[in-house]
Image (spheres, coloured by chain):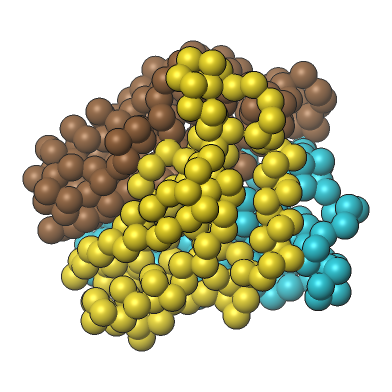
Chain colours: A cyan, B brown, C yellow
Amino acid sequence: MIVSATFAVQSKGFADVIDITDKVELEVAASRVRGGLVTVFVKGSTASVSTMEYEPGLVADLQRTIEKLIPSNIPYNHDIRWGDGNGFSHIRATVMGPSLTIPFENGRLSLGTWQQIILVDFDNRPRRRDVLVQILGE
Amino acid sequence: MIVSATFAVQSKGFADVIDITDKVELEVAASRVRGGLVTVFVKGSTASVSTMEYEPGLVADLQRTIEKLIPSNIPYNHDIRWGDGNGFSHIRATVMGPSLTIPFENGRLSLGTWQQIILVDFDNRPRRRDVLVQILGE
Amino acid sequence: MIVSATFAVQSKGFADVIDITDKVELEVAASRVRGGLVTVFVKGSTASVSTMEYEPGLVADLQRTIEKLIPSNIPYNHDIRWGDGNGFSHIRATVMGPSLTIPFENGRLSLGTWQQIILVDFDNRPRRRDVLVQILGE
């Protein structure tokens, strides 16, 4: 059995970190699939998905770490060519990746106690993001 | 056909790198599924899975690289708020990600000759980790 | 329904970034599966797959960022032990990961408008890479 769903998320951009666990869980529950795999995929080349303990301290730590590793205030060839000003957003998204696959059982995601699913929007402006959820199971 | 399995791994924490290829292969063999996909997912917000050539030189190189990129000896907001002392562990796990999907054929993982599946435990203490294996195929 | 396919890609190594979107799309079309998930997996321990807007500016930005984060010109234990000279290639591949899962619908990948699938070959020499494509759906 395969069920596809899409939901939208409004972000502020600039490494905005959004907890999307509830939205993914709702789609899994609505699918009536009992056990299997759910793949979460964000469309676009300037956002990523991963998991983390979603609390304000770690959100700030993640944003500061990413800023240090892939700075927003240095020149990028992408910006010289296209003038978008979001070269840093693209590189961050490519390194962290756009997709994540999580097992579920009895209609519930098999996450750790302190493990939430996050979308990180690296773009340099607010964005409405389409998140695709693909549920495979029985 | 879908088969779910879980196995436990004992780690020492502090970026302990553990080769879990044999355990994943055993689950694939036990499932009797001939070909398809196996998803490996580590529960918890301070560990990751990936692949590497598992040899002591590269294990040391990986640990040193991660320590340089996301240091353990700088302040993290997570630690100021919660006193866990493992803010660095969380950020490392979020950047590297908790899941991995690998094709298999004739009951054998389609890995490269020098490519093993690893669990990296970033926490700041020994942990018993649950690794979920979801096998989809026919 | 599950369909497996493999295609080969010739790379120049040294963080060569190759757009493999067309090759993945061809396999999805040839499979006759209408909707589901496609997993892209690169065999070997010195290459990765991800997505990006594939244009020369961002390719250069990605290469420069990776060189800064995981330099090729510092000593690696792997090289001292084995003399391969590609310790940096291994560590880069482990951090970025070997696999990616993407939904598709009506035979077309659900990518963003500016989002392509890339293979990054981190090895220190030209390589012929096997990319595995596993298509699950109905």
Residue lying at 75% horizontally and 60% vertically, measured from the top left: A89
Q: Quadrant of residue C2?
A: bottom left
Q: Position of residue A115 (x, y in %)?
A: 54, 42
Could you say which is closer to the camera, residue C132 or residue B46?
A: C132
Q: Position of residue B54 (x, y in %)?
A: 40, 25
Quarter holding the C terminus of chain A?
A: bottom left
Q: What percent of the width, then of the height, locates residue C123?
A: 51, 42
Quarter where residue B42 is shown:
top left
From this viewpoint, is residue A9 visible?
no
- Name which residue lies at 71% across and 38% down: C69
Q: Which of B67/C86 is in front?
A: C86
For this orientation, the residue located farthest to the right is: A73
In the displayed structure, does residue C43 sit left or right of residue A44?
left
- Toward the left, the furthest residue is B32
Instruction: Tell whether A45 sits left or right of C33.
Output: right
Vertically, is C42 above or below C51? above
Residue A30: x and y in percent read 39, 70
Which residue, as the protein is rendered here, is positioned at the far bottom?
A: C106
Which quadrant would the N terminus of chain A be assigned to in this image?
bottom left
